[in-house]
Image (cartoon, rainbow, N blue to C red):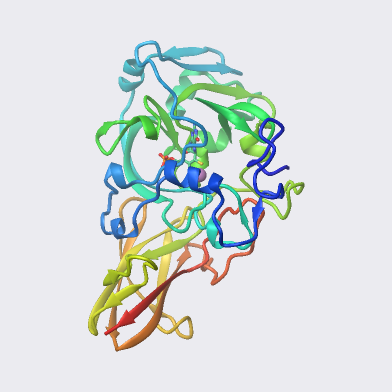
């Protein structure tokens, strides 16, 4: 597995290792960061993220789509191949689910060394109301064959990654693809999907990191063998080196984030807070059955206390938490950590991996109280 930031067409990025050893930002990281914005953490206040504040991750370019000529093709190991217009898809059963989506690379830039790629800190998140039709009803209509092992989803967007010219493609096992909550989505927050979020149609796979939710979808293919595409076997693996096949990245790990309290210092974004009663608040989520517990530390991790939990926005979305803090003059390090339904607790520091995936190490908020 070679670094995806350099390839035979465009060989030199950094020193060729694909890793950045210093704090200095590479031009390639800056280019990606300016295209793929994060959700400012103060937007954790909204149960549903306003569309313009939801994070974005676009590997290549936003494709130009001719809405009239566009068709969704369902092919491969199916009895009745289908070719559907958007209007035909919209006539099928309609369902809306609030889903918290997070990029698997969220937290990447907090690893050292870090992969030269989209340099996320903590902002690659958002919760939207996604409206569409269940994928499984369309797959039933197409009559997937018993010989099908996986369903491959292809986007219209193309680019070069890891020596391969490719469309963005991901697969799901038939079992995962036919879960009730997996949707073919044509609306976000009650409006047609905007270009940057996958117009005219995208997949949404609740509970999994965002890479599974293929945008600009135009082809769904049932295949007999596990799909070996770049985004399945080269990218999105928990691996220790460029050559390590590693483990698959799928379910969203538990995470809690806090709205940084008080006001920011312009340069460092450290916080200035007035002494007295401060309500700390934010959101917490996990792909694996949701969040069971949120704890806060106001003393740099020496002690942790339970936060109060609000209701989940949906079974596939975050829940709010609050914690009453009596802020005393001086410098403080605030931290918050979530546990998922099976008791996995966010680590202080997540184990490093080559691609910079799944870094749910706890958020650290530096505060000066006056
Ligand atoms: N076709 C296509 N689908 C895609 C991507 C892409 O680049 N192309 N990026 C994926 C990744 S890595 C993430 S995290 C989510 C981001 O979805 P959003 O931009 O709507 O937040 O889309 C996924 N679907
Ligand atoms: Mo992502």
Q: Does residue 279 lie above or below 351 as drawn?
A: below
The quadrant in which the C terminus is found is: bottom left
Q: How many marks?
A: 0
Extreme-right residue of the structure: 243
Judge by depth and name the residue closer to the eye, 331 or 94.
Answer: 331
Horizontally, is 160 left or right of 366 in the view? right
Of the pair 284 and 341, the residue shown nearer to us: 284
Q: What x and y, as percent, mark residue 274?
A: 23, 81
On the image, the x and y values in percent for residue 92 come to: 33, 22
Name the image quarter holding residue 20: bottom right
Q: Is residue 340 above or below residue 272?
A: above
Q: Quadrant of the N terminus?
A: top right
* Residue 297 seen in the figure: no
Location of residue 326 (image quadrant): bottom left
Residue at point 68% right, 39% down? 233
- Residue 248's spot in the image, x, y percent? 64, 47
Compared to residue 322, the image places residue 133 above or below, namely above
Report the side of 274 relative to 167 (left or right): left
Residue 364 shows up from this direction: yes
| Relative vertical location of residue 247 with respect to residue 266 in this rendering, above or below | above
Q: Position of residue 287 (x, y in %)?
A: 47, 53
In the displayed image of the protein, which residue is found farthest to the bottom? 329
Query: As rendered, which of 193 and 328 lies closer to the eye?
Result: 328
Query: Residue shown at 63%/42% (left/top)?
Result: 5
- The residue located at (22%, 82%) in the rendering is 277
């Amino acid at each position: 597995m070679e670094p995806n930031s350099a390839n035979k067409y465009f060989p030199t990025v950094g020193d060729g290792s694909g890793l950045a050893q210093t704090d200095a930002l590479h031009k390639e990281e800056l280019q990606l960061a300016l295209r793929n914005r994060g959700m400012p953490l103060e937007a954790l206040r909204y149960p549903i993220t306003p569309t313009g504040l939801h994070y974005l991750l676009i590997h290549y370019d936003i494709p130009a789509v001719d809405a009239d000529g566009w068709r969704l093709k369902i092919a491969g190991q199916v009895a009745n191949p289908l070719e559907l217009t958007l209007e035909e898809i919209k006539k099928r059963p309609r369902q809306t689910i609030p889903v918290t989506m997070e990029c698997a690379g969220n937290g990447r830039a907090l690893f050292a060394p870090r992969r030269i790629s989209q340099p996320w800190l903590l902002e690659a998140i958002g919760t939207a109301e996604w409206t569409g039709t269940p994928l499984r009803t369309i797959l039933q209509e197409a009559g997937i064959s018993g010989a099908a092992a996986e369903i491959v989803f292809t986007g219209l967007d193309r680019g070069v990654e890891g020596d391969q010219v490719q469309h963005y493609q991901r697969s799901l096992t038939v079992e995962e693809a036919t879960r009730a909550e997996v949707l073919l989505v044509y609306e976000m927050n009650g409006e047609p999907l905007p270009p940057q979020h996958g117009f005219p149609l995208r997949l949404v796979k609740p509970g999994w990191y965002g890479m599974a939710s293929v945008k600009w979808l135009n082809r769904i293919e049932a295949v007999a063998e596990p799909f070996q595409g770049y985004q399945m076997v080269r990218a999105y693996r928990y691996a220790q080196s460029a050559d390590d096949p590693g483990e698959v990245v799928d379910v969203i790990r538990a995470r809690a984030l806090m709205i940084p309290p008080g006001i920011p210092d312009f340069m460092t974004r450290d916080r200035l807070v007035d002494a007295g009663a401060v309500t700390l608040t934010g959101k917490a989520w996990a792909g694996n059955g949701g969040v069971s517990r949120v704890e806060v530390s106001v003393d740099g991790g020496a002690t942790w206390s339970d936060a109060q939990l609000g209701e989940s926005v949906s079974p596939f979305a975050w829940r709010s938490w609050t914690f009453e803090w009596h802020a005393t003059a001086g410098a403080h390090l605030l931290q918050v950590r979530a546990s998922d339904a099976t008791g996995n607790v966010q680590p202080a520091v997540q184990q490093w991996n080559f691609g910079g995936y799944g870094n749910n190490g706890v958020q650290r908020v530096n505060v000066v109280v006056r």
